[in-house]
Image (cartoon, helix red, strand yellow):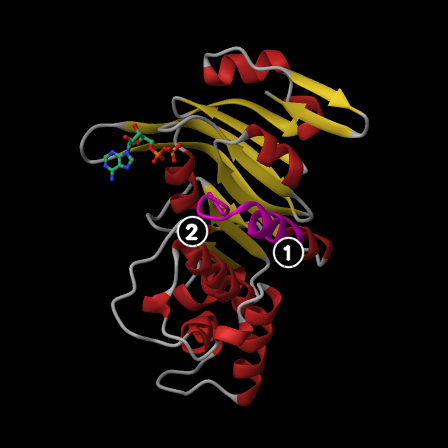
Amino acid sequence: MTALKIDNLSFTYPSGTRALSNVSLEVGQFTTLALLGSNGAGKSTLLDLLFGWKPSSNIFLFGKPLKEYGRKELGRNIALVPQSEHYNFSFTLLEYTLFGRAPYLKEMASPSDGDVRIAYEALEMVGMASFAKRSVTTLSGGESQLVLIARAIAQGSKVLLLDEPTSALDPANRRKVIEILNLLHDQGKTIIFTTHDAQFAYELATHVAMLKGGKLLSFGTKERVVTSSLLTTLYDTEMTVCTVGEKTLIY
Ligand code: ADP
């Protein structure tokens, strides 16, 4: 089943910068898709549009135009993990993670015990449960990235969008996030993440969409798309894909 369909999508910022040109692709339900490209390729713009930041007639979520979704309905179907967050208020990690349950709450209602349990379990999953009562304003960049992932897990949506999900993480936490995302993939989630790191894309994704100058250079399974010649074209610098034992290395 197709989770997301992007049909001939273009986007120009009010400043006149054309960030995306005629992008078309279909993402199946059990797909982990890497949006791969250099800085300025249009990856974050595409992710923002998939999250409904600007109404678009060219994006379909489970067959229905994205712009026809109400805010709460959209929140039950799609969650966004931004690269970072500016915390204006001193919420605890548990309170902050509970925001992920907002699409399920009636107007003015408080979260139920079940919502609190789901939020706590999400913090456990990312290894932050022991900090549940700490304030989000005290977190390091890497810890904050883990909490943002926990909030999205608590949201329980079928589609998960992540903007450079490991940009602030050390190698151990990077590995942990790869394991968490693999687990969510096995649970049937559709995962779409941006990265400029071809090695990371290869490690995590089942499929790769290469973006260059706002255009789709190539899209398909990672085994088909991640080649020395396509990566060299993508980055305008020589790239080599090689196999060492069972590992695929890109340098
Ligand atoms: P990436 O995520 O691949 O680094 P972006 O989607 O952030 O790329 O940017 C794509 C293009 O759109 C770039 O040329 C960038 O300068 C431009 N851009 C991004 N955000 C804005 C904005 N808010 N206003 C104007 N131009 C923007």
* Residue drawn 39% across the image and 39% down it: 44
Q: Which residue is rendered at x = 60% and y = 71% of the image?
A: 124
Q: Residue, x 43% and y 35% (percent of image)?
A: 43
Between marks 1 and 2 in the image, the one whose residue lies nearer the viewer: 1
Measured from the top left, where is residue 212 in percent x and y? 44, 22
Say what amino acid the circle numbered 1 marks: Ile
Q: In which quarter of the image is the C terminus?
A: top right
Numbered circles on residues, count? 2
The residue identified by callout 2 is 51
Q: Earlier in the sequence, mark 1 or mark 2?
A: 2
Residue 78: image x %, image y %? Answer: 50, 57
Outermost residue, right side: 245
Q: In this view, does 220 lie above or below 230?
A: below
Q: Is residue 154 magenta?
A: no
Residues shaded magenta: 164-180
Quadrant of picture, ligand 1: top left
- Amino acid type at image mark 2: Phe
Query: Please, is residue 148 above or below residue 193 in the view?
Result: below
Percent of width and height locating residue 190 = 62, 50
- State whether residue 82 is above or below residue 147: above
In the image, which disc is placed on residue 211?
Answer: none
> Label 1 belongs to which residue?
180
* Secondary structure at numbered mark 1: helix
Residue 172 is a magenta residue: yes
Q: Residue 102: where, in percent of width, then height?
A: 43, 74
Crowd around label 2: few <14 · some 14–19 · many ≥20 (10 Å)? many
Q: In this view, does 143 lie to the left or right of 201?
A: left
